[in-house]
Every structure is written in structure tokens, then in C-alpha cells.
Image (cartoon, helix red, strand yellow):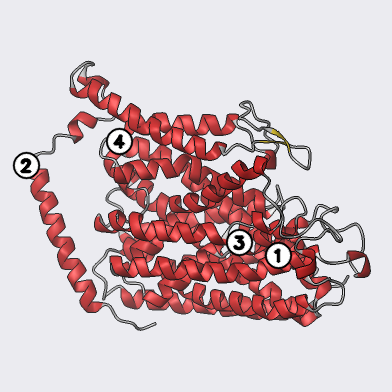
Amino acid sequence: MTLNVPGLVVMAGFYLLILGTGIWASFRSKKQENKCTGDGLEITLLAGRNINLLVGIFTLTATWVGGGFILGIAEAAYNPTLGAVWALMPVPYVLTFFLGGFFFARPMRENRYVTMMDPFQQKYGNVMSSLLILPALVADVLWVARTLVSLGGTMSVILDLPYVYSIIISSVVAMVYTLMGGLYSVAYTDVIQLILIFVSLWVCVPFLMTNPHSLDISLTAYNQTFQAPWVGTVELDQAGKWFDDFMLLALGGLAYQAFYQRILSASSYTQAQVTCFASSGFCLVLGIPSILVGAVAASTDWNSTAYGLPTPYDRDQAGSILPIALQYLTPPYISIIGIGAVAAAVMSSMDSALLSSASLFSSNIYKNILRKQASDREMQWVIRISVVVVGLAGTGLTFLDTSVLVFWLVGVDMSYTIMFPQLVCVLFFKVSNAYGALIGFMMGIILRFMSGEPLIGLPPLIEFPGCRPDAEGRLTQYFPFRTAIMILSLLSILLFSWLAAIIINKGLVPEKWDVFKINRKRKPSAGAAEAEKAKQAKEEVYEAKQLLDNTTSF
């Protein structure tokens, strides 16, 4: 196979379009600086809390519909041991956005937080919040890795471009425009990328469905043909694992900084809700083409194609089934259009992960702990350096594994079992404090590692009911153990927070033992109360001005 020159030309044009959009958006962000009342950090990370409604919907949708979303769904639908019923991503995301819009958006916006970690820092202090930032940062790095893996595999199949070059080029382009304009650049490039994703995927579907090498997917949905039916099944003894995966995807997404970055950038709570609800519908629609690609691939006689035998699954290439199907089941010009969709999806998610992690480090660690007096110019450089470091770390991880689902599930797993219960407690339970958070954090990590993970070859030390080898011989937990760990972590946070408060407030231990100073935080001074009232008044004035200044310009 030779280098696909026309495909390279098309991809070069795509990258130039995205880069040009990012540069234009960076100039637009500079023009907004005089119009926004927020500081430079808010303008870079939250677009001055005045993002356009339509742009907000596009950027939130594009953040979730990434390369892992497109390739992961196709991989699950094609995999004969899974099937479409295990391609869960679109449906849980509806629940993610509705829960976020109804419950999580209000407390985050009312307190005018800049990042997801602000409530932890204000309530638990710098030490505990710094500890909790670590899993959030790791999840973002894994997010970068899984998006790049999806694009690297696609380009190597369709363009015959070396895997390394594909990943490095995409990583550099995403980092460049993210560095230049912050959330403005990310959001406006997401608009272009989401349009490309939608058009490209649906253009490819008719050619895939009518190719001569595949049977009608309605015949193979429930009948054994070239492999097991592509719809798949959820047996009674697998129901626990299916439920666990569903809840992992639905609730794990609520503990990502990228989600709150979009919510906090809206000009009002109502706009934030509309953004969430509209994005949920887009995720459903954009998940359909990937399911159809997996269904067609599962209905294909690969021996009659240029790909030949063994099948992609037997060659351990199920993770690249979407580009393989495009390459061997559609005309060359269609496969090039398809790679445009994957590239757009990858860029739209990668830039979000880069800015998300940069937000956490620059705002919660550098600005609030290391250099409280840092100027706006200094913070801009900190953000840029953070983007580069995270980009390089995520790029490096792509050479360790080529499965999109591995990075996808491990990253979301950390958010679900460790960060989600912490976020629920800090936002909705006044009793929570740093002592309970520390116990819950340690319990979540210890139980999760002891439960094992077959995707990374980690054997379980704790075997929950139903633990047994899967179809590939790997010892797997079929009990909803991650949901159980999440609940145990949440309960332990509340229980030990309550016990710690009783012990300290009743003077059962010396006051010097209260290392997290929770007793001091319960006794605000009169000056602090007045300062809080002044802050609330200032926020009300700001909200009123934002409503007056808000425009519908793109």
C-alpha cells in the first residue's frame, strides 16, 4: 500500500481550516477583553462568561463526541463478544447532560466558580483540594491519549501515514490553536469540527450500507452469519456489568472539568440548561452512524475483500474497525471524507482536555496556592505551559496501547469511582469536610485497585459475586463493583465527616490536632460575613450587566 496523496492533501486542508479558525477566534478573544468585566483568567478559561448559546451547544457536544466516542461505539458494535447493546455511550450521555443541567449547573454558577475544583478548595483547603486534583488531571491526560489513538489508527489505515506522524501532527495543531485563544479558540473550532463530523459520517453511511461484500444488517442483527449477531445480548449474569458500564458513563462525565467549563462560560443559568439539553439530542444523533459502521463490519465477508482473512477481530484490530470498514468497503474518496470526521472528532475533544487540565493547574494550584499575586500575563504563560505539558504527556501514552476503549474506560473510571462522590458531597452536603473527603478518597482508590481491571491486565484481589473469566479468558467482575465502590466512597465521606465534626467540635481532641481547621471554618467572623454580602451584591450587578451586554452574534 502506498501513501494516499489525495487524502493527505484533504487532511492538510482540514488542518489549515481548523488552525485558521483558531487563530481568528484568538483575535476575537482579544477584542472581548475590553467588553468583559472578568479578569484575564476568566476570559481565557471561560470566554468572559459570555459564550454564545449556539456556540455553547456546539462546543459541549463536540467535547463529548470525540474520537473515542466515534471509534469506541463502532468497536463495541462490531466486537462479536459485545454487540450494539454494549455500545452505551450515546444514551448515558443524555442522562449526564440532564443531571448536569438540572442539579449541578446551579450551585456551580451561583458561586461563580472558575473550575470544578473551586468548591473543594474553598471548603477543604489547599492541601486536600490539591490531592483531589490529581485524579482529575490524570483523567484529562488519558482523554488526550484516547483521542490521539483513535486518529493515529485511522490515518495509518486510510492514508498509510505512519502512526507516529499522525499523532504528532494532530497533537501539535490542537496545542497551537488552544495556546492562542483559550476557550474562544476551542469553542469556535468546535463549531467547524462538529459540522464536519455530522456531514462526513452521514455521507459515508449509504456507501457502507450498499457495499457488495456485506449482508443486509437487518438479517445479521439476530442471526449468526460471519460472526455473532451484531445487536448482541445482555445475559442475566451480565446485567450487573452492563448496569455498571451505563452508570460509569452517565455519572463519570459529571466529574470532568470540561463539562463545567462550558456550563460556567454561559451568560446565565437558563442558557447553561438549554446548552445541556440540546447537546444530549445531538449526542444521540451522532452515535447512530458509528453503530451502523459496526453493524456493517459485523455483516461483512472479509474474505471477499482486499483485507482478506483473518478478520479484523482475529487480528486484534477491532479498535480500528471504523477506518478499516471505510478503507475496504467504500470508494477511496468516501474513505477520505470519513477520516475527516474522525480527525474533526479527535481535535474537538483533545483541545477540550488540554484546556481543562490547564484550567485546573493554573487556577487551583498556581494562582490559588503557589503565586496568589500572579499577574494576568504571567497566568497566560502558565496556561500555555500547562497545555504543552499535558499534550506531551497524552501523546506519550498513545504509544503504550492502541485500544480506544482502554483509555476511554480507565479515564472515566477514575472520574466515576473517585471524583464523582467527592463532587456530590462538596456541592450538596454541608456536613462534608476534608477528613471525610480524605477517607473517601483513599477508600475509593484502594478498593478500585483491589478490584482489578482486565483491560490493563490488573488481576482482582477482591472477587465480587459473579467474578469469572470472560469470553477472552480474562478474569472479570460482572457485579456492578464500580457503582458499589462509588456508593461506599460517598457514604464514607459523609460518615467520617460527621464523626470528625463531632470529635473536633466537642473538644474531644486538642484543637492543634485539627489539621484541616474545620472548627475555624465553622465560625466566620463578622467581617467575613460582610465581605460575603458585598461579594453577592457585586455578583448581582455583574449578572445584570451580562444580560444587557449579551448578544447573539456568532
Q: Amino acid at mark 2?
A: Ala
* Residue at numbered disc 3: 69
Counting residues from the start of the chain, the first of labels 2 and 4 encountered is 4
> Can residue 299 be seen at all in this image of the molecule?
yes
The alpha-carbon separation of the residues under discs 2 and 1 comes to 59 Å
* Residue underneath mark 2: 526
Q: Residues within 10 Å of mark 2 (few under 14, many from 20)?
A: few
Mark 4 Cα shell of 10 Å, populated few (<14), some (14-19), many (≥20): many
Q: Is residue 522 left or right of residue 283?
A: left
- 4 or 1: tag closer to the N-terminus: 1
How far apart are the alpha carbons under marks 2 and 4?
23 Å
Say what secondary structure mark 4 lies in. loop
Quadrant in which the C terminus is drawn: bottom left
Task: Name the mark nearer the viewer: 1 or 3.
Answer: 3
198 w.r.t. 353: above or below: below
**Residue hosting label 4:** 432
Question: Which secondary structure, mark 2?
Answer: helix
Residue behind mark 1: 166
**Marked residue nearer the N-terminal end (2 or 1):** 1
Going from N to C along the chain, the mark reached first, 3 or 4, is 3
Residue at 50% over, 35% down: 485
Tell me the quarter of the image containing the N terminus: bottom right
Gap between marks 1 and 3 measured at Cα: 19 Å
Q: Is residue 292 left or right of residue 240?
A: right
Which-is-in-front pick, marks 2 and 4?
Answer: 4
Q: Earlier in the sequence, mark 1 or mark 3?
A: 3
Judge the density around disc 3: few (<14), some (14-19), many (≥20) Cα neighbours within 10 Å. Answer: many
Residue 4 x, y percent position in the rendering? 80, 76
Determine crowd level at label 1: few under 14, some 14-19, many 20+ residues with C-alpha closer than 10 A. Answer: many
Look at the numbered disc 3 and give the secondary structure of its residue. helix
Instruction: Point out residue 50 in the picture as x, y percentages from the top left corner.
Output: 31, 71
The vertical placement of 385 against 479, above or below, is below
